[in-house]
Amino acid sequence: MIELGLEGASQKIIWSTLGISKSTADAYKKKYPEFAEALDLALVHSQAFYERQMLANIENKGYNSRLVEIILRGQFQQDYKENRDTKVDVKVEAKIDFQKEIGDLIKALKE
């Protein structure tokens, strides 16, 4: 797993190479801490692989950094998700008959 991570492999590539399904990998991660640790390290190496490529090609105008960005956002969503705060002004107009509401409240309290 770690060797695959060093080459930039995704989880799916790792599982495919190991010949296991996602559900089996999830079960192994719970049952075998060393499997979970190796997978986590492999994914750290995978992410670092692409980040190193981007850094090495920072001035290379022919390098497809957009493709690498898409790969990183797809494989490492937690680290590359966009957070956008949206402010919405909402104006609500409500008409309340306070006399009726107070009357209903007093009546309920008396009962």
Image (cartoon, rainbow, N blue to C red):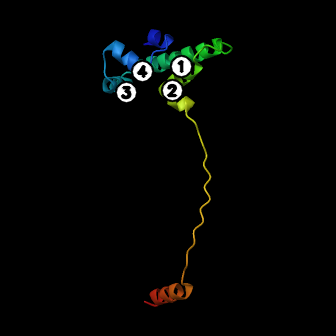
State yes or no: discs 4 and 3 in contact (Cβ < 8 Å). Answer: no
Looking at the image, which residue is at 61% across and 16% down? Answer: 54
- Asked where in the image residue 17 lies, by quadrant, the reply is top left
Say which amino acid is labelled 4. Answer: Gln
Q: CA distance from mark 3 to mark 1?
A: 23 Å
Mark 2 vs mark 1, CA separation in Å: 7 Å
Cβ atoms under marks 2 and 1 closer than 8 Å: yes
Where does label 3 land, which residue?
30
Mark 1 or mark 4, earlier in chain = 4
- Residue highlighted by disc 4: 11
38 lies left or right of 66: left
Neighbours of disc 3 within 10 Å: few (<14), some (14-19), many (20+): few
Which of disc 1 and disc 3 is earlier in sequence? Answer: 3
As measured in the structure, the alpha-carbon distance from the residue carrying label 3 to the one carrying label 2 is 21 Å
Disc 1 target residue: 47
In terms of secondary structure, where does tag 3 sit? helix
Q: Amino acid at mark 1?
A: Gln
- The single residue placed furthest to the front in the displayed view is 62
**Separation (CA) of disc 4 from disc 3:** 16 Å
Quadrant (top left, top right, bottom left, bottom right) of the C terminus? bottom left
Query: Residue 69 is drawn in which quadrant?
Result: top right
What x and y, as percent, mark residue 79?
56, 29
Residue at (69% x, 14% y) in the render:
59
Q: Position of residue 24 (x, y in %)?
A: 31, 24
Q: Quadrant of residue 93?
A: bottom right
Residue ID for mark 2: 76
Specify the amino acid type for callout 2: Phe
